[in-house]
Image: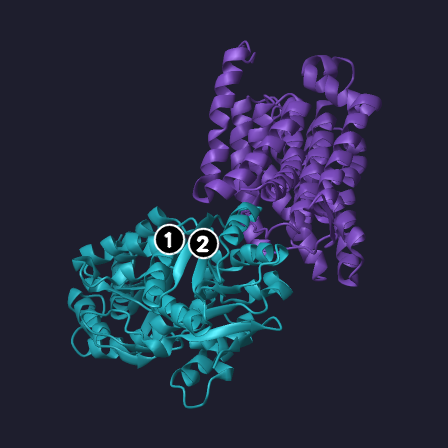
Chain colours: A cyan, B purple
Amino acid sequence: MKRVYILRALGAALAFVLAGAAVADINIGVTLATTGPAASLGIPQKNTIELLPTSIGGEKVNWIVLDDASDTTKALTNARKLISEDKVDVIVGSSTTPNSLAMREAAVDSGTPMISLAASAAIINPTDPKTRWIFKTPQNDALMADAVAVSMKANGIKTLGYIGFADAYGDGWLAEIKRSAQTAGIKVVAEEKYNRNDPSVTGQVLKLISANPDAVLIGAAGTPGATPVKELVARNYKGKIYQTHGVANPDFLRVVGKDGNGQILPAGPMLVFEQLPDSNEVKKTAAEYVVKYEQKFGTRSTFGGHVYDAYILLSKAIPEALKKARPGTKEFRAALRDALENSNVTGTHGVFVMNANDHNGLDNRARVMVKVENEKWVLVK
Amino acid sequence: MDLSIAALLAQDGITNGAIYALLALALVLVFTVTRVVWIPAGEFVAWGTLTLAGLQTGAAPGTLKVLVGMAVIAGLMEAWGCLRRGQTGRLPRRLAAWTGVPVAVAALVWWLAPMQLPLPVQVLLTLVTMTTLGPLLYRVAYQPLAEASVLVLLIVSVALHFTLVGLGLWFFGAEGSRTPAFSSTSFTIQGVNISVQSLLVVASSLALIGALALFFGRTLYGKALRATAVNRAGARLVGISPDFAGALTFALAALLCGFSGVLIGPITTVYYDSGFLVGLKGFVGAIIGGLSSYPIAAAGALLVGLIESFSSFWASAFKEVIVFTLIIPVLLWRSLTTTHHEEDE
């Protein structure tokens, strides 16, 4: 009987020590779309997590990665689980806009800072009180759309046709490009939608061509962006073709092949960091990340860079927060939020200068125009 | 919209319709013989394209791993069955058929994959791989439940669909692939541009449908399958093994689906999860045929292709809505015109 007692006491002591250790660690909860329709974003992001160090500011960091299968409900469930069960100090994710919008609720309710990896500016819209706890690393659509409109104006384009995904990404870009185009004096003469898995876009492309625009913008992410290009080329479209930064991955170049040459798109500087002048602030950080990534996983993806940027933000903010409170406490999360809001760091996609009204903080340094030449990305100077 | 645009849209619709028609035929075939609503048909389409795309890059496609894995499981199931019934004498032959042949096919494709053989040979290898996968799927997933109700078989199909999509993501990755066109030339008749590629798609679909008609009309195996479709118990009484009929059906259906995959590859980018939507459109065609009539199913699939193509021109945002809404009037019409009879189980 006595032996059992001692064992129990030992067990309890051990559990206590382990729990104590777990509390002292910094827990970072990550939910990514590693399966489902957005898997081409989520997989390089998950790979990037594997490259990240396991200690920040002298404290051990646990990266807890969950898959939300590109599903909005699952993303919210994951966020709640990370907060209530894993007691995370900060949430990173998810890869897509709808998922990130859904997760905000969980982050705000519990007072946990969240760094989104999705594009839409709506996620951090400063007029929305929910966004006090929300930050994001990718460039806002508006920033990229402005760059596209400026480039179009410089190329003497007067009329524009748009074909994009029939989802939040495509609709978001349509709204942004309409605004930017109007500022640049460009008229949007045709709007078409398609789905990522459509076997053919012949109908949409014929309609675009019959409107005869000077240029076509394709609002798509990843390899599906190649489908309208192939069709436009097959139908002898002679105008310029623009893409969004959503296609900036090597698989897009593989699938689009020769037909992709001549396309222009805005992208984060890391895509073509080798071609940037040495004076560019972003070049060093981008090189550091891309070299590490390519050694282990093959060709770079700009989506992975967003995760690395989230890490860079945290690596600066966590030591600040540690001065005020211990990880695992409410005070630590609040201190972390305050530190993030005052971020001023250089990442792989640009320079983040945040304030209470801008939880993204990227400016013109976070975008370059890139052209596809000989099936490669070439920086437009 | 002028005539030349209408002609282009019709051409596009017929090309896609021909591909959906192959799928619709596969679905009708599987349903009539085995009573399985074969939802994973679409995955076989996607895997067909992705296998060919893998062979194009000179890498052994992930499909081979699935093939070997399923062959091992099928072999174990056969061995267990033989041992339980005490028929150890039959074991070597069964093992050779269920494990030996698929493993040999996988080894052959694996050996030939890095050789960058000409496109027709790669297509052939793809079709052989996909066709071998069909009966294995039946043996592992459906045969043990062959006598279960349609609903149970449907649930198995749904589960298989998710399993195969997951395996597809694992083996082929999240990004899509395209295969090279069989021909990039085109010619003009009466001011209408016709691409040789779409002619090839329609012609090869027609050829395959013709070959199937011959198979069912003229060969003993084909007649055996028809007999099973008409009356399972009766077919069994005259000595047609239902297990064999099921395996043969799945081989044919897998061939049809794999072939659609090969045809669709040059037209669009195919992803690990592309198959489901393509399969659903074939399914709409098959439903128009009441899951029993081959010619009406093929015509229905063609109609789906045409509607899809024209609605993508007029209202691209609502294209899928229009295509899938089509099924409601069809179901209404079918339920009003056909006499309903409870399934006798």
Q: Are marks 2 and 1 on the same chain?
A: yes
Disc nearer the start of the sequence (2/1): 2
Q: Alpha-carbon neighbours of circle 1 within 10 Å: few (<14), some, or many (≥20)?
A: some
Q: Secondary structure at mark 1?
A: helix
Label 2 resides on the chain identified as A
**Residue occupying image coordinates x 73% and y 26%:** B245
Position of B214 relative to B278 (above/below): above
Q: Position of residue B276 (x, y in %)?
A: 54, 41
Amino acid beneath label 2: Gly
Q: CB atoms at circles 2 and 1 under 8 Å apart?
A: yes
Amino acid beneath label 1: Asp
The answer to whether residue A50 is visible is no
Q: Alpha-carbon neighbours of circle 2 within 10 Å: few (<14), some, or many (≥20)?
A: many
Q: Nearer the viewer, residue B173 or A161?
A: A161
Label 1 resides on the chain identified as A
Q: Position of residue A221 (x, y in %)?
A: 47, 59
Residue A171 marker: 1
**Residue occupying image coordinates x 63% and y 30%:** B27
Q: Position of residue B128 (x, y in %)?
A: 76, 45
Direction from residue A289 to residue A203 in the image, left or right? right
**Residue occupying image coordinates x 49% and y 78%:** A380
Q: Position of residue A307 (x, y in %)?
A: 39, 69
Direction from residue A271 to residue B247 in the image, left or right? right
The answer to whether residue A5 is visible is yes
Q: Which residue is mark 2?
A: A164
Figure quadrant of residue A173: bottom left
User: Distance from label 2 to label 1 (Cα)?
Assistant: 7 Å
Position of A31 relative to A304 (above/below): above
Figure quadrant of residue A239: bottom right
Q: Secondary structure at mark 2?
A: strand
